[in-house]
Image (cartoon, grey):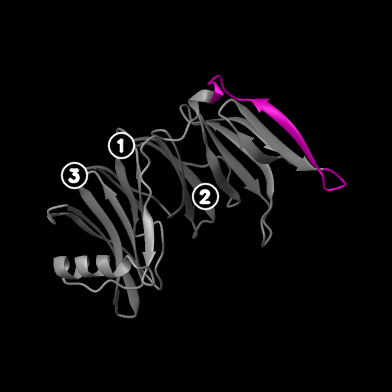
Amino acid sequence: MLKKIEETFAGKIWNTVFYEDKMVLEVRDESSRQVSFSALNLKTGEVLWKDYHPEKSWWLGLVGIFGNHLVLHKYSDQQKPEPLGVILINITTCEIEQRIEDWIFFSCDGNILVLYQLDESNLPIYQSLEIGLKPFQSFIPEQNQHFVRHYPDSSPHFPTIFKFLYHLINIEAQNGVDYLEVNDKIVISYYIYRGKQFQNYLLVTNKEKKILLHDFIAESEGIGIDTFSMKSDTLLYVKNQNQLIGYEI
């Protein structure tokens, strides 16, 4: 296995979006109350741009990548934030192409961006904007997607994985695991309980039970799901909340 991504960010990796070989991260720095965005090419591991602040604000969030464009939502600063506008960013140049105040994202096919807002009767009004030249047909789901499965300890599959981990590395997995078989490899994210905390580890073996990777991910008060993913033949996981790790697999 070849490590091709190892990037540390000045805040917690809060959210991620993908399209083809592109990935964008939403990073939140709680001390400065600022949110930034970074983009990577998963095929090469190249950082396209990093720590970009479209606005000096905490109230921005990822919507998605559509072709060569990244869409962000602006939010109010209320306890239950509501979308207040849309920011459209060119991923290649890392430049803002449009700010559209008071409209909410509805859909995008990579060419036409559809927004809406509510009128006085609380009924939606729509507007469409052309943002690209790629035809709709090119925006198809990624082929050969790998879906990570979460098995809680109540699942009939959990005892089998529990025994596999116990015999291989002599640990007793707690509460649940994330599991994936890809090519000739088995990927398992598991938890053990130590010192009143759950410790999360990522294990990769081949079908002959040779350990290829065994890495500590994080410590927490409970267990999570979706602790790793597979995109563009790259195994991705977030370590210690602020570090993105990627292996070619």
Relative to 31, say whether 92 is above or below: above
| Residue 198 spot, x, y in % from top left | 34, 72
Q: Element under label 3? A: loop
- The C terminus is located in which quarter? top left
Judge left or right: residue 144 versus residue 74.
Answer: left
Question: Residue 46 location in percent, x, y?
Answer: 32, 34
In the image, residue 194 lies in the stretch drawn in magenta = no
Q: Earlier in the sequence, mark 3 or mark 1?
A: 3
* Spatial separation of the CA atoms under disc 3 and disc 1: 14 Å
Disc 1 crowd, CA 10 A, few/some/many (<14, 14-19, 20+): many
Kindly identify which residue carries mark 3: 1
Q: Amino acid at mark 1?
A: Gly
Q: Position of residue 79 (x, y in %)?
A: 67, 62
Pick whichever, 75 or 127, lies toward us.
Answer: 127
Q: Residue at x 41, y 64 (%)?
A: 224
Q: Residue at x 31, y 53 (%)?
A: 180
The residue at 19%/70% (across/down) is 166
Residue 50 visible in the displayed image: no
In the figure, is residue 194 to the left or right of 39?
left
**Disc 3 residue type?**
Met
Q: Residues within 10 Å of mark 2 (few under 14, many from 20)?
A: many
Q: Which residue is mark 1?
A: 45
Residue found at x 31% / y 67%: 158
